[in-house]
Image (tube, rainbow, N blue to C red):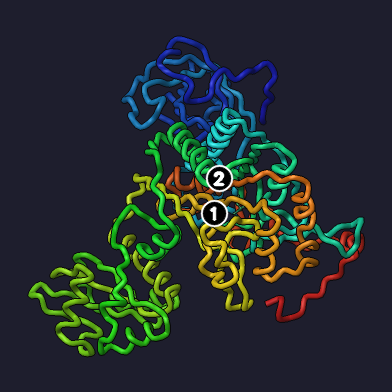
Amino acid sequence: MTESMKGLRRTHRCTEVSREHIGETVTVMGWVQKRRNLGSLIFIDLRDRSGLLQIVFDEPKVGSEGFAKAETLRSEFVVAVTGTVEKRSAAVNENLKTGDIEVIASGLRILSESETPPFPIEENSQTKEELRLRYRYLDLRRPDIQRNLMMKSKVAMLLRNFMAEEGFLEIETPILTKSTPEGARDYLVPSRVHPGNFYALPQSPQLFKQLLMCSGYDRYFQIARCFRDEDLRADRQPEFTQADMELSFVDVDDVIDVNERLLQYVFKEAAGVEVELPIPRMTWQEAMDRFGSDKPDTRFGMELINVSNTVAGCGFGVFTGALEQGGSVRGINAKGQGTMPRKKIDKLVEFAKGYGAKGLAYLAVNEDGSYKSSFAKFMTEEELKSLVDKMKGEPGDLLLFAADKNKVVWDVLGALRLELARELGLLDKNQYHFLWVTEFPLLEWSEEENRYMAMHHPFTMPMEEDWDKIDSDPGSVRAKAYDIVLNGTELGGGSVRIHQDDIQEKMLEVLGFTKESAYEQFGFLLNAFQYGVPPHAGLAYGLDRMIMLMMQCDSIRDVIAFPKVKDASCLMTDAPNVVDEKQLEELALSIDISEEKEQ
Ligand code: ASP
């Protein structure tokens, strides 16, 4: 039989009770973590979102009815306990915040009972994630997930505080809207009132925040849900949260300045992490050349070295062939890994192939100075020596080379560098290496579409210095775009936007828009720009990722209350699901799933 709350009032959360309350009467409420019967005493650990508190039931104090009730308690029952706070009679539990006290119950109410949960509610659960996500409401009771969500709430509050102090206004933008050119696939929502027409869920508030600048709001901020229908990877979710901002009358340095202070404040207040300012900056070109990545993890070295000049004209066709095709040859030096067994090297070769490499050339410098190599036989002694010198190879080192188009070489060695660092334990989660990556290319050539695409989005401002190359060499034009990177993860990114007609027109032309197609997609923005647009710029953070890094979680799902899994479904609600025939009729939709599509 369960009881009501009538006449009861919670005085404290579990861990708010402390030594200071010894001798006082408190009323606490929560879930039974576990019950232990010790002779004439019954102990329970009571749990709420703040933590655990030990309750003792002693028959003379709680009465025979209360004691009998306590005997029926099982894990996850919800109870209210009134009692006196006392110093622990038995050993103090150093691991608990309330480890030196206990509450001697004088009253107990069972507010609700619980079935035996399908998995224990405990920290660092070993239970398969699939089962946990099916019962997410139970999984969310686990202290580690609760800590993550409490941190997210705290960070959101800190962001709001900071932004308000800096004169930003929090303004909502629509969820039912029109496609934004962020480059991913849209989620669509059919319109009942306009049969055959669809809203798109926003991939970001991009166009609206730019409009707000046109409308004179000067500084905008929003914690905004964004939707992207992409194939999911480990750190992606179909819906995710951005901390999004836009500022008027600013250039790159102004955006960086406000955001450095924001990061310093939020990381310090939320996670106790000191961010030293200024945060280092690196151009995109340098990031690619040194790390093979536009989001370099700078917690460790193992940088890429361009050996193209050194191997030009050597006897190894794989190297010279790549150079003849306009590519490059680059390597990394895995220090002290020269004795890596052949099998392991073969695994690295396979790994590299996964990133588009045709192969991976290696050279181990033996302790006696001789070489063990996949290509030594194609090169002269001098050629080998100058290559090893260029790579700063010493006895015991393993040198790994990729030869291909630049993009492939960067991808392969960038990924390999990280993989080796993971294997060698070089990634220290307690270090926070922030980095601005700036001067991204404006455009990116798409083999698939056989045209240039905007690397960020079509409203990104080119660098003044490069503008005269927009016709002759569009691929070399750099943009006023920047990313903020933390430990090899893109935490956020943004750009200065185009506010000048002629530049916008040219940009759209280079991207292959006709006037009509541009107006059809975002004519409202182009029109707005006809009525006085201030220079503006902005940036958006992936809030989930930020929390994930702060809390040192491995998965983004651990910082989202109700996440989806890889195929974009929700295991708890079974969304997406089929709908009534009647609903489809109202929307003037009919479903035709051919057999291939079903598979
Ligand atoms: N809307 C951009 C994005 O989602 C961010 C920005 O440019 O402010 O990546």
Residue linked to disc 2 = 251
Labels 2 and 1 touching (C-beta < 8 A): yes
N-term-proximal mark, 2 vs 1: 2
Residue 233 at least partly seen: yes
Quarter holding the C terminus is bottom right
Residue placed under numbered mark 1 in the picture: 480
Neighbours of disc 2 within 10 Å: few (<14), some (14-19), many (20+): some
Residue at position x 63%, y 45% in the image:
536
Q: What's the amino acid at mark 1? A: Lys
User: Residue 301 location, x and y as percent?
Assistant: 29, 58
Quadrant for the N terminus, please: top right
Residue at image position (64%, 37%) is: 219
Residue at the extreme left of the image, as rendered: 368
**Picture coordinates of residue 489, whole percent (x, y):** 46, 54
User: For the residue marked with disc 2, what is the amino acid?
Assistant: Asp
- The image shows residue 457 at horizontal and vertical percentages of 62, 59
Q: Is residue 48 left or right of residue 509?
A: left
Q: Give 370 or 467, whichever is nearer the viewer.
A: 467
The residue lying toward the viewer, choosing from 308 and 233, is 308
Left or right: 402 as drawn, with respect to 228: left
Q: Residue furthest top?
A: 23
In this view, the residue in front, 38 or 155, is 155
- Residue 110's spot in the image, x, y percent? 61, 28
Q: Secondary structure at mark 2?
A: loop
